Amino acid sequence: MRKPSRRAFLAAAGSVGLGASAGCLGFLETERATREPPLPDDRPDAVYVPSHVEGMEMAGMRTQGRYACALTYTFPHRFWLVRDGDTDRVNVRGEDDVHLMVAVWDAETGTVLPGASVDIEHTGPDGETASVTPWQMLSQQMGVHYGDNVALGGEGNYDVVVRVVPPTTRRTGDAPAADPVEFDFSLTFDRSALDDLAFEDIPADREGSRGAVDPMDAASARGSQAPPADSFPISVLGTAETGGAQLVVGTADRRGSLAAGDDETYVAASLRTPHNRFVLPSASLSATVDAGGEQVFDGGLVPALDADLGYHYGAVVPTSEAIEAATVRVDTPPQVSRHEGYETAFFEFPPASL
């Protein structure tokens, strides 16, 4: 059965009126722009089911060499910026027209690419040009992407250029060129069509409960998912839950160019969301590792990209002995902006002993 549209939700919301907001201009402007449902009461300090699920429109997907890029958009909505261990809620402004979202991944491995520098330039039907630098974000539908609320202007056709400077994240295999790449898209902005996007208002008895909505079936979302613990591509040392996230730690004698010596072992820590297994980037991790009855490592785990492991945090440990135990610490929480359902999680991380 087809999900009701945002237009139907707006009509239902309008039938109860906005009289209660008449004395607060800022709230009224936000309601006119989006009419998102209120946030769930008593949100847990964990991943939770959001108040609603929005439909999206795909403007296109492009490939340039090793890099793939998808541009999608939906109606504007609230989100949260993260600065160290604090959040700063961004509300919809009266001039916001759409929420633009860019996903970037390795076209060869399918791995999402956190840490890229992304710029979006849009040229409107009258030749007016503006640009925006989107935030790195995490959502339950898309996983890791780049997005922001954007004021376009008049309705009509827009030429959009997405410029991507690839991340300098360490790779276990061959690194593709790090030169900037551009992707060209065409987007038709029509307010009526935007209001016709699917919109699901989550029932009150489910919203705010621990859990998550399902991810979208798209290459960008699949590329954000870490491999399950029971099919991890290297030997699993242990798993743990910390800070509302899941942690899987594995070891390997060799991982590409990162553990080339006979007396070295590669240790990989995969930090991911529960439920959807989305990688949690831009955090700071460290670990102590024991092997042969003694501590053989105490230091940082560096972000890395691997064709099978995906985005993770790793280190080359100077030992050929079997690793017996490890304690992993998340020293700085993931510095990634959050869509609703993730903004209360992933901040306080007790050390995880494996």
Image (cartoon, helix red, strand yellow):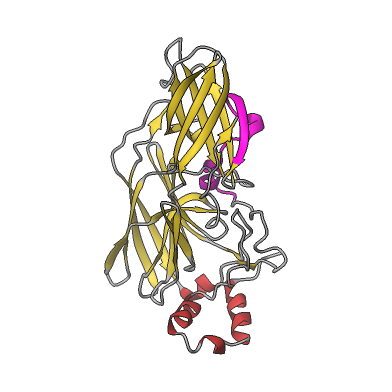
Q: Residue at x 51, y 71 (%)?
A: 193
On screen, residue 321 versus residue 122, left or right, reads: right
The front one of 244 and 12 is: 244
On screen, residue 131 versus residue 12, left or right, reads: left
**Residue at the outermost top position:** 262
Residue 277 in view here: yes
* 220 is within the stretch colored magenta: yes
* 102 is within the stretch colored magenta: no
The answer to which image quadrant residue 239 occupies is top right
Instruction: State which quarter of the image contains the N terminus.
Output: bottom right
The answer to which image quadrant residue 292 occupies is top right
Residue 255 in view here: no
Q: Residue at x 45, y 59 (%)?
A: 87
Residue 340 against residue 218 in the figure, above or below: below
Residue 243 against residue 131 in the figure, above or below: above
Residue 166 against residue 129 in the figure, above or below: above
Q: Residue at x 56, y 68 (%)?
A: 197
Residue 107 against residue 48 in the figure, above or below: above
The front one of 37 and 120 is: 37
Instruction: State which quarter of the image contains the C terminus.
Output: top right
The front one of 120 and 310 is: 310
Q: Position of residue 9 (x, y in %)?
A: 61, 76
Q: Position of residue 232 (x, y in %)?
A: 60, 29
Q: Position of residue 236 (x, y in %)?
A: 61, 26
Q: Position of residue 74 (x, y in %)?
A: 49, 64
Q: Residue at x 66, y 54 (%)?
A: 211
- Tell me which segment is drawn in magenta: 217-241
How many numbered discs sit on the rendered protein?
A: 0
The answer to which image quadrant residue 283 occupies is top left
